[in-house]
């Protein structure tokens, strides 16, 4: 009896999860793989083959875009880590108990506004007739209004701003678990600031760093709105290619292949990152 | 602080001349957090190679004092000297004082070898020397084979010893220990007390040990300072503190005592008679520095082992001398603890008095409900003006 109840509750709890995994993750991806392996030989006539993937390799603009997206995403991840780490350290270790909550909340507030509105916020600031440009003209620093939008720097800045929270949260939670006396012991035994940071704080925070980097990298490489709105047509983001294939060209087969390539590419980068940092998924993402 | 001449600690002039003999000196150190005076004008000197404890209840300022010595807090006034040199303006990583933290603070991401080697690497010791020094220190703490273990694979006692080894490998002038035994279970704690004392002898280094556990302080230390609300109440050997407490706080905090509040009814300076608040007449001796005169409010302390409990039917009243306090009562309960067994006796005025008894397991042993007399010498009633 007791056993049956336990089994029933397990099944009930497990069902939504299983449905989600099967219906929203596994099935669409199987569909994508099948779709990507089809090629159109004539109207409504399809053959199975690797033509879509071969197209990708033969057309430099495709894989250049993918590589560019990867490099930019790595840059965004690095910047988010460099900016996010001091913030997380301040929140977890330096701020008092009461300020800690307030600071954390302040970091969360931008999330209440949708991605789209936040991107428009940047546009208002940075466009030719925007706040920054007008202020600089008014102050006499520049003669003519400048267009700050539609370049890589803006895209990177906008992306860092969008994703940095996902870096800060896991970092705060790992650093929070670190006993302050560990840092003090680091100094007490003769280490100076850089030594303590390099040999104690960073190794201790490594699971949080890796978890944050994975999440941020995946989010950035798969983001669509920010690069399009802030980078315009020049942004050449790979998600834009996928969107083009699906919607503009109505070439679902090629779009599916591109989608699968993006997944494979980001997975390989994450795997490489884990290998290089000597971490595993179970010690990082699963932990924080 | 009384300033009694038996504590060399207070004579600043004296240790100015002989400064090199002391590994650690604190001179009138004070520290304030906001409006709270955490450490208030504390002075101490620790001779080379001795085991010194600071004993006090939690929140008395002992941890703050230790953190100032380690350099994590800056004193508002006063001076801290290590081997005669002031270190007040030296950053913590440049002071040759190492610290064993309350929860040890071993680095979980390094193995045992790296934990011990950390300090040596920070000091730029060449790799070959690091190897031999780590091996050497592991042998001295009798754990020669653990170098490649991870921290989480060690037992509580092993972690303790690694934390000490990590400090000792750097040959510190003073080793600070901040209640490191607090997290251990009782049996291990008893064993570690003895081990710490032995390690201190072996390394011949000055240990400054902080604790709220009086038995740790009494068992291990050469000298103990009893601290209360930011000040030292008394500094002395463990025997000294136990048998000759300077203040009521020390008498109550160090060792177990019966404690009565009352009023002096007569006094000739040293021997006094007092009446407790519950109306019992007790004769006692004035301790500490404050003189007791007639009418003063007094707190009296008697240690259980100084009270002799005898069954009434034994007819041994004859030996009750005039100087002795005698009261009669009924055994309320037995507190059996092997050789340290006690009885709780309810006397006629309604107080509970704790006395030590010998319980042999025979039929002559006291039982709850027995009528008994309790007697003790006036000299054993330690009285302080309150």
Image (tube, rainbow, N blue to C red):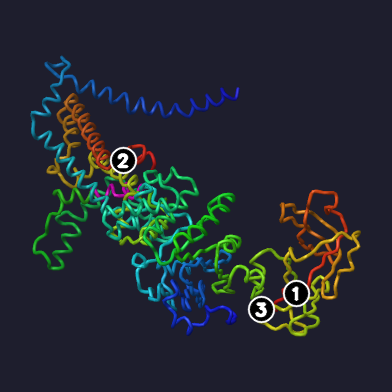
The magenta segment is A159-170
Q: Residues within 10 Å of mark 1 (few under 14, many from 20)?
A: many
Q: Nearer the viewer, residue B267 or A204?
A: B267
Read off the chain for label 3.
B
Tell me the element at label 1.
Answer: helix
Q: Nearer the viewer, residue B139 or A78?
A: B139
Tell me the element at label 2.
Answer: loop
Name the residue carrying label 2.
A279
Name the residue carrying label 1.
B379
Read off the chain for label 2.
A
Q: How far from the left and from the top, in percent, is residue B206?
A: 46, 66
Name the residue carrying label 3.
B288
Q: Residues within 10 Å of mark 3 (few under 14, many from 20)?
A: some
Q: Which mark lies nearer to you, 3 or 2?
A: 3
Task: Name the residue: 31% across, 40% down.
Answer: A279
In what quadrant of the picture does the C terminus of chain A appear?
Answer: top left
Give the label on residue A148, or none: none
The magenta stretch spans residue A166: yes
Tell me the element at label 3.
Answer: loop
Task: Name the residue: 86% across, 60% down.
Answer: B372
> Is residue B243 visible to the viewer in this orientation of the structure?
yes
Q: CA distance from mark 1 to mark 2?
A: 70 Å
The magenta stretch spans residue A111: no
Are circles 3 and 1 on residues that touch, CB within 8 Å?
no
Q: How far from the left and from the top, in percent, is residue B280?
A: 83, 71
């Amino acid at each position: 009896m007791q056993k049956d109840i336990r089994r029933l509750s397990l099944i009930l709890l497990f069902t939504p999860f299983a449905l989600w995994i099967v219906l929203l993750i596994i099935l669409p991806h199987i569909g994508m793989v099948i779709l990507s392996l089809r090629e159109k030989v004539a109207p409504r006539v399809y053959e199975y083959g690797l033509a879509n993937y071969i197209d990708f390799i033969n057309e430099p603009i495709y894989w250049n875009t993918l590589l560019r997206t990867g490099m930019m995403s790595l840059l965004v991840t690095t910047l988010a880590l460099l900016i996010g780490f001091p913030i997380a350290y301040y929140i977890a270790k330096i701020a008092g108990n009461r300020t800690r909550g307030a600071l954390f909340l302040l970091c969360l507030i931008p999330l209440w506004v949708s991605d789209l509105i936040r991107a428009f916020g940047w546009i208002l600031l940075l466009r030719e007739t925007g706040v920054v440009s007008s202020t600089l003209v008014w102050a006499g620093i520049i003669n003519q209004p400048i267009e700050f939008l539609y370049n890589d720097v803006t895209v990177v800045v906008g992306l860092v701003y969008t994703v940095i929270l996902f870096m800060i949260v896991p970092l705060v939670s790992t650093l929070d678990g670190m006993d302050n006396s560990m840092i003090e012991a680091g100094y007490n035994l003769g280490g100076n600031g850089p030594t303590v940071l390099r040999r104690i704080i960073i190794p201790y925070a490594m699971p949080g760093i890796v978890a944050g980097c994975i999440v941020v990298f995946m989010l950035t490489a798969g983001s669509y709105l920010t690069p399009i709105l802030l980078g315009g047509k020049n942004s050449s983001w790979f998600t834009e290619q996928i969107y083009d294939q699906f919607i503009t060209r109505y070439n679902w087969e090629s779009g599916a292949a591109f989608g699968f390539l993006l997944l494979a590419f980001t997975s390989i980068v994450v795997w490489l990152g884990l290998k290089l940092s000597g971490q595993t998924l179970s010690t990082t993402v699963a932990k924080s | 602080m009384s300033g009694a001449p038996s504590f060399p600690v207070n004579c600043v002039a004296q240790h100015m001349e002989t400064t090199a003999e002391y590994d650690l000196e604190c001179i009138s150190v004070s520290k304030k957090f906001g409006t709270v005076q955490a450490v208030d004008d504390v002075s101490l000197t620790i001779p080379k190679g001795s085991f010194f404890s600071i004993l006090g209840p939690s929140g008395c300022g002992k941890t703050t004092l230790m953190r100032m010595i380690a350099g994590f807090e800056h004193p508002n006034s006063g001076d801290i000297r290590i081997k005669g040199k002031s270190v007040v303006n030296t950053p913590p990583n440049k002071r040759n004082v190492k610290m064993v933290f309350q929860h040890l603070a071993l680095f979980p991401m390094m193995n045992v070898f790296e934990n011990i080697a950390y300090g040596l690497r920070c000091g730029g010791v060449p790799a070959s020397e690091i190897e031999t020094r780590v091996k050497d220190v592991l042998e001295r703490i009798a754990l020669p084979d653990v170098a490649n273990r991870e921290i989480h694979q060690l037992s509580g006692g092993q972690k303790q010893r690694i934390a000490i080894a990590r400090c000792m490998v750097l040959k510190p002038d003073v080793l600070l220990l901040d209640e490191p035994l607090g997290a251990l279970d009782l049996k291990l704690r008893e064993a570690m007390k003895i081990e710490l004392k032995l390690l201190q002898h072996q390394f011949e280094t000055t240990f400054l040990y902080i604790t709220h556990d009086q038995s740790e302080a009494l068992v291990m230390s050469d000298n103990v300072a009893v601290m209360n609300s930011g000040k030292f109440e008394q500094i002395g050997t463990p025997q000294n503190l136990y048998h000759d407490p300077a203040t009521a706080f020390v008498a109550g905090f160090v060792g177990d005592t019966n404690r009565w509040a009352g009023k002096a009814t007569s006094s000739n300076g040293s021997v006094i008679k007092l009446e407790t608040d519950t109306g019992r007449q007790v004769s006692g001796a004035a301790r500490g520095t404050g003189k007791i005169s007639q009418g003063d409010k007094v707190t009296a302390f008697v240690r259980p082992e100084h009270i002799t409990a005898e069954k009434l039917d034994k007819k041994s009243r004859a030996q009750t001398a005039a100087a002795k306090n005698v009261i009669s009562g009924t055994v309320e309960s037995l507190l059996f603890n092997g050789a340290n067994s006690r009885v709780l006796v309810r006397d006629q005025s309604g107080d509970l008095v704790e006395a030590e008894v010998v319980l042999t397991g025979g039929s002559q042993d006291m039982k709850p409900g027995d009528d008994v007399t309790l007697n003790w010498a006036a000299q054993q009633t330690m009285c302080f003006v309150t």
